Amino acid sequence: MQVYSSWRALLVAVVALALHGCASSPDEMVECGTVSSYLAPDNSANLYRVVVTHLDGVAVISRPNYLLSPGEHAFTVAELINSPELKVSLSARKVKVFTVNVELDQRYHIAAQFNTDKIYIGQNQGYWQPIIWQTESHQCEMKR
């Protein structure tokens, strides 16, 4: 009977600790930075919007802002270049991965830079690259 009582006390203690962790998590604020894709960049500067398909290797539904812990994060993006000068075949229009080093309380606006300094035809994928086109100070807090 005493063994049962000891196991029961241990189980109650483990459940209490687990519930305590769950109860305190929603109120805990975590410092972060933001990566954004909602601003329309200046097309006259050969900058175009992107759509995020994956974040750190995990498929995501594209959204305007990503609140992230400080550190490196890998974004997989597809370009939305709608320039009449773009003569690259649709099969060459592939996603690209780039890394953003997120810092505390910073917002990074990402875009596709259309490289117009060369003529790109056929399957050449060098016609664009993902970039951070604007960085600004932005207070960021997210719940854990």
Image: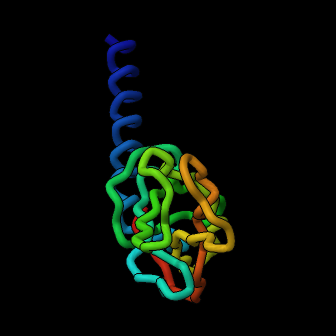
Colour scheme in the image? rainbow
Q: Say which of 40 and 74 sits in front.
A: 40
Looking at the rendered image, the quarter that the N terminus falls into is top left
Left or right of residue 52: residue 15: left
Q: Which residue is painted at 34% across and 66% down in the image? A: 63
Q: Is residue 124 above or below residue 116?
A: above
Image point 37% across, 68% down: which residue? 27
Q: Quadrant of the C terminus?
A: bottom left
Q: Is residue 115 left or right of residue 23?
A: right
Q: Residue at x 50, y 48 (%)?
A: 92
Q: Position of residue 19 (x, y in %)?
A: 33, 46
Report if residue 55 is visible in the image. Answer: no
Between residue 112 and residue 58, name the one nearer to us.
112
**77 to 64, vertically: above or below:** above
Q: Is residue 128 visible?
A: yes
In terms of depth relative to the viewer, which is nearer, 3 or 81?
Answer: 81
- Image position of 93 (left or right of 24): right
* Whole-percent x, y for residue 7 in the image: 38, 20
Rendered image quadrant of residue 15:
top left
Which residue is found at the position 43% from the left and 73% from the top?
84
* Number of numbered discs overlaid on the protein picture: 0
